[in-house]
Image: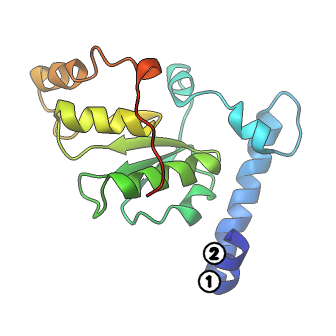
Amino acid sequence: MLSQLFRRFPCTSMLQNLNRTSMLHRAQQSPTNSIPSIAFFSSQRSLKSRLREGENLYGLFLLSFSPEIVAFAGYDFIVIDLEHGAGGIREALNCIRAVEAAGSSTVLRIPDNCQAWTKKALDLGPDGIMFPMIETGKAASDAVSHTAGIDLRESEVVLTQL
């Protein structure tokens, strides 16, 4: 599918080369010094651990709900924006799947700081959630409280592509 995309849009060959360079750079940092594979991507350190270690990470806000190109561009994370983007839960789920399949982490920016959106976001399984309009300590506390008591291991949600 990606090769068809590169044939249709020649300007994307630059992104393909960038992706190869990024993947080779990541492979050099891996303990095995091998070309990245699906197993390599699944064993990457988590976004949270990389942030804790103070690593410089590069990301991109995705507003188009067409993650195919940006997912392979070599970014460390992609923010899927439901606050200003035109899509909803279905589009966000497809974007999360595509980005994670390419080896990047996902952060989902929800449109409202409420428990309903927080639960929906957690059910989709991104690596992080970005809450909108956090300008006070109370707003931050409220956002964190929306995640309290949610045990993802016991979640009965089964997401399928509709």
Looking at the image, is 132 positioned above or below residue 2?
above
Between 57 and 97, the one nearer to me in the picture: 97
Q: Residue at x 16, y 39 (%)?
A: 133
Residue 143 occupies which quadrant of the picture?
top left
Q: Is residue 131 visible?
A: no
- SS for callout 1: loop
Q: Amino acid at mark 2?
A: Thr
For the C terminus, give its image quadrant. bottom left
Residue that badge 2 annotates:
12
Residue that badge 1 annotates:
9
Between 76 and 109, the one nearer to me in the picture: 109
Q: Residue at x 40, y 25 (%)?
A: 155
Looking at this view, name the residue that lies furthest to the top: 149
Q: CA distance from mark 1 to mark 2?
A: 6 Å
The answer to whether marks 1 and 2 mark residues whose Cβ atoms lie closer than 8 Å is yes
Q: Position of residue 156 (x, y in %)?
A: 41, 28
For the N terminus, give its image quadrant. bottom right
